[in-house]
Amino acid sequence: MQDGKSRLGLSLGFSKNSETKSILLTTDAEFIADQLKTQFDMVINPVLVKISRRESSSTSQWILKETTIKMRGYTLNEINVLHYSGKDELHDTTLETDLRQQVRTLRIRDPSKYHASLGHISIKTSETNMLFPPASSWAVEASYISWTSGSQGMKTVSVKMAWKLKGGDNPSFVKYNIYVGKSAREAKYLGVAKVGAFYVSDLVVVPDVSNLIFFIQVCSSDGTSQELDASPTYKLAVKG
């Protein structure tokens, strides 16, 4: 909960040999003053997953957001909560950096201007490399295919794709990134699915394309994802 003048962020510190990286997770990246952004190597705005009401109150809500951070070879050694004001309130805060300990703190001159409540934070990591099933282990189908002709040979297509693991569901797979293109290298991101289905609406197809390849990138609960060129696919011939 916020009063509109302050925000709550999560600061993560990583290290690899003598190199350090700092990442700020925030609910509103545009709210942060540029002076504060420069203190971090990366600023990430997690994606809203769902809003649910708390059991103890008919009005209060829990807001669940998720993000995936890949820092191969780095060790997570700092988790800090950062309470900060926005661009209009920058004069009320100063940022101090302890170079020896690499710990960032925010000194608040007027604490009454800051108000927030922190809920549950879950951080997951993988001790072993996830082994994704090969593309041939998935059954992918397309339905509700609809083509529309446009000007200068352009076309649009709408299609529903559904997929499932032939050997049964795997609870480790929590989402699927959907791409389309002539190849994995040229594929364009379309969206994300939390279930084994995705609907593409009015996708523009240029005249020189004879086939569309949809890539379904499998993502596991530990944040890892299958290589796109090894992911299950569906090849759709462009209607002549």
Image: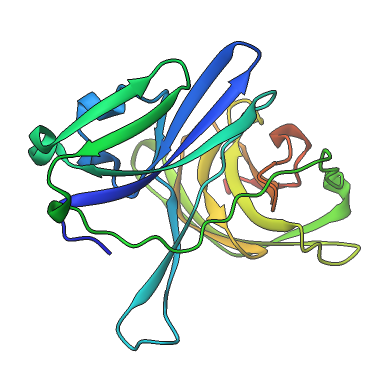
Q: Quadrant of residue 74?
A: top right
Front one among 153 and 225:
225
Q: Is residue 233 left or right of residue 156?
A: right
Q: How many marks?
A: 0
Residue in the image at 82% along x and 55% along y: 138
Residue in the image at 86% along x and 43% along y: 131
Image x and y of residue 72, in percent: 68, 26
Q: Quadrant of the N terminus?
A: bottom left
Image x and y of residue 231, in percent: 75, 42
Q: Is residue 227 left or right of residue 187?
A: right
Front one among 138 and 10:
10
Indicate the colouring scheme. Answer: rainbow
Q: Point out the residue furthest to the top here.
A: 18
Front one among 60 and 183:
60
Image x and y of residue 81, in percent: 40, 45
Q: Quadrant of residue 145?
A: bottom right
Q: Point out the residue furthest to the right here.
A: 167
Residue in the image at 63% along x and 56% along y: 175
Up-down relation of residue 79 to residue 103 (above or below)? below
Up-down relation of residue 217 to residue 24 (above or below)? below
Q: Quadrant of the C terminus?
A: top right
Image x and y of residue 59, in percent: 30, 84
Residue in the image at 58% along x and 41% along y: 180
